[in-house]
């Protein structure tokens, strides 16, 4: 083996080893080896958050304020929007680990609605961050968003769930909201009927 | 050996691709589970059904009014839905006549179509309406009301008010049943306070409010008296309730309005003084120093000036050259104390025997600490001569 064949076999061996090592490196870097890799875990958590959020909104929307099937009786979700409008003057709140504190000029003591109470029970104690918003048409073809509870910008892996409620002029005299760009918050978009406005209640959830 | 290495490498690549595909499809499956569409679909259907019954009731079965109501509703709903990729059309097929007797009757028949970006669903929706007419009166024994207890709670949106004609506090009263804890509607509640008065939304004085269907009532508290106001409420004269149950006390402190001071534009840039520094040696140059006093007189009030800056610049030099400039700045000046600041500029005489001249500009900038207004003043002087004389 002390001739040219020995040299060739050595070179061949080194090349073969290089090819195997190179392919191993490439394969290890491109393969998500375990099912607990970050993308898989995030998808799972997002699915859980979406289920929790939809459960909260669906349960409150399907539960009426008093035990009746009369659709004229407000659901707890609808009542939450009404309470925010009437008793909190459309103010924006934040959760300070103890209570909801008002962030706008009106110094309301707290935000007391069935929805925010349910969120406190279902999300806060589990360490899930959340934002709560109301989207509604302004009657001019635009859709506007008002923040009800704002705890900061959500993370990239946040999930937003929503539920629609309809407000009527007879719903405990929904007050005229503050004006932005000459448009009131939750304006009466159908003055000739008792329809007041349509609201999409949006709940954004994310894990800190 | 090389062939084996190639075969092993290809095998590793194939295995890696298979694993990646498995994980990819698992993740895609999760994204499929996370489709919000099914929730929105149910929510839209519920809304349509409830609004249809509400419109039927509100319009007493009048088909034209009903259609107008529902068209406005669907239009507003589409405003909210279209950004999410949904579009709803609602076709009313029949509006049944308004029932004339008690019972449950068919109300409306509709066809609801919900279109998304890549699919469309159509639902046939029929609603019913239950009408309950008052029963004919039958002689019944006179009911003996048994007093029931309720719990009255009062809260306010503020604990401090200012003594102005426009400042009010929003007072909210909650009435709940003592036994069940449920809200009590239509309960008259008397409002009390040691000072001040309650008003409704129109500014009219009120002494009593009635709870709405959610057991809540609101009023506005208004006062022109200084000091601590104690507010509470009690159950009023309701036929079936034990009157007099008193709520918790709410304390609101009314304070005087603190009028902010006003920073006047009261500082003054004085005329410059010139100091000629002649050197007896002809080969040495003479110097001319221009000093400009800035007076800040004492002013009433407790306000302060902040970010005081005074600068001095020169131009149009004739037989003069800048040597040094002394600007001044101060972060905080007491407005109540008289002060004089000085800025100065030192020139070099180029030719001792020739006349000289220059313009000197003094600028003062100061910010009022109360209203954050920036106050400025600028003055320009011409200095000239031989020997120097201020003009």
Image: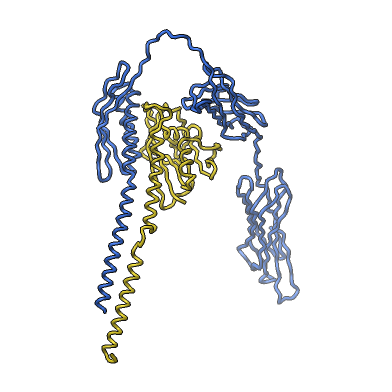
Chain colours: A yellow, B blue
Q: Is residue B104 left or right of residue A151?
A: left
Split into 4 quadrants, where in the image is the N terminus of chain B?
Answer: bottom left
Split into 4 quadrants, where in the image is the C terminus of chain B?
Answer: bottom right
Instruction: Please tell me which residue is depicted at 51% across the width and 43% down the height of the picture.
Output: A94
Q: Is residue B326 above or below residue B79?
A: below
Instruction: Please tell me which residue is depicted at 41% across the width and 49% down the height of the picture.
Output: A158
Q: Is residue B123 left or right of residue B158?
A: left
Q: Tell me if residue B201 can be seen.
A: no
Looking at this view, is B373 or B26 the one in front?
B26
Looking at this view, is B164 or A150 the one in front?
A150
Q: Residue B40, percent across and down?
A: 33, 40
Q: Residue A84, percent across and down?
A: 47, 35
Q: Residue B85, percent across and down?
A: 31, 44
Q: Is residue B291 above or below residue A191?
A: below
- The furthest residue to the front: A1
- The furthest residue to the right: B280
Q: Is residue A174 left or right of residue B308?
A: left
Q: Residue A23, percent across and down?
A: 31, 71
Q: Tell me if residue B326 can be seen.
A: yes
């Amino acid at each position: 083996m002390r001739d040219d064949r020995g040299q060739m076999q050595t070179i061949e061996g080194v090349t073969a080893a290089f090819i195997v090592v190179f392919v191993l490196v490439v394969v290890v870097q491109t393969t998500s080896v375990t099912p607990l890799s970050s993308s898989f875990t995030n998808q799972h958590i997002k699915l859980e958050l979406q289920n929790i959020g939809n459960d909260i909104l669906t349960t409150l929307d399907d539960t009426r304020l008093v035990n009746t099937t009369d659709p004229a009786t407000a659901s707890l979700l609808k009542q939450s929007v009404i309470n925010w409008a009437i008793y909190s003057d459309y103010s924006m709140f934040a959760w300070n680990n103890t209570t909801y504190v008002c962030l706008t000029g009106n110094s309301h003591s707290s935000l007391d609605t069935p929805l925010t109470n349910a969120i406190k029970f279902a999300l806060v104690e589990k360490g899930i961050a959340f934002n709560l918003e109301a989207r509604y048409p302004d009657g001019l073809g635009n859709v506007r968003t008002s923040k009800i509870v704002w705890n900061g910008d959500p993370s990239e892996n946040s999930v937003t769930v929503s539920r629609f409620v309809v407000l009527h002029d007879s719903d405990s005299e929904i007050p005229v909201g503050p004006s932005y760009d000459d448009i009131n918050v939750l304006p009466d978009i159908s003055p000739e009927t008792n329809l007041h406005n349509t609201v999409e209640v949006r709940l954004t959830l994310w894990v800190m | 050996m090389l062939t084996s290495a190639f075969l092993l490498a290809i095998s590793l690549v194939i295995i890696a691709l298979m694993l990646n595909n498995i994980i990819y499809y698992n993740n895609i499956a999760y994204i499929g589970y996370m489709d919000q569409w099914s929730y929105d679909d149910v929510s839209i259907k519920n809304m349509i059904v409830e609004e249809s019954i509400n419109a039927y009731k509100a319009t007493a079965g009048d088909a034209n009014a009903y259609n107008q109501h529902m068209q406005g509703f669907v239009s507003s709903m589409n405003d909210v839905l279209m950004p999410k990729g949904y579009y709803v059309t609602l076709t009313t097929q029949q509006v049944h006549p308004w029932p004339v007797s008690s019972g449950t009757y068919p109300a409306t028949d509709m066809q609801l179509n919900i279109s998304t970006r890549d699919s469309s669903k159509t639902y046939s929706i029929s609603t019913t309406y239950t009408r309950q007419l008052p029963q004919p009166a039958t002689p019944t024994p006179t009911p003996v009301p048994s007093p029931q207890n309720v719990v009255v709670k009062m809260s306010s949106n503020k604990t401090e008010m200012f003594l102005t004609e426009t400042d009010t506090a929003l007072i909210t009263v909650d009435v709940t049943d003592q036994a069940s804890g449920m809200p009590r509607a239509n309960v008259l509640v008397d409002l009390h306070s040691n000072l001040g008065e309650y008003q409704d939304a129109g500014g009219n004085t009120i002494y009593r409010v009635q709870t709405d269907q959610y057991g809540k009532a609101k009023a506005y508290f208004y006062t022109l008296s200084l000091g601590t106001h104690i507010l509470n409420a009690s159950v009023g004269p309701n036929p079936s309730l034990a009157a007099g149950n008193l709520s918790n006390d709410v304390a609101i402190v009314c304070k005087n309005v603190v009028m902010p001071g006003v920073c006047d534009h009261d500082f003054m840039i004085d005329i410059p003084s010139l100091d000629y520094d002649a050197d007896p040696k002809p080969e040495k140059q003479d110097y001319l120093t221009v000093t400009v006093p800035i007076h800040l007189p004492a002013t009433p009030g407790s306000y302060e000036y902040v970010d005081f800056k005074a600068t001095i610049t020169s131009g149009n030099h004739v037989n003069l050259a800048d040597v040094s400039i002394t600007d001044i700045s101060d972060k905080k000046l007491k407005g109540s104390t008289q002060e004089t600041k000085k800025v100065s500029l030192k020139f070099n005489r180029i030719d001792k025997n020739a006349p000289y001249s220059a313009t000197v500009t003094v600028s003062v900038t100061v910010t009022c600490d109360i209203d954050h207004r920036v106050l400025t003043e600028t003055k320009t002087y011409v200095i000239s001569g031989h020997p120097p004389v201020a003009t």
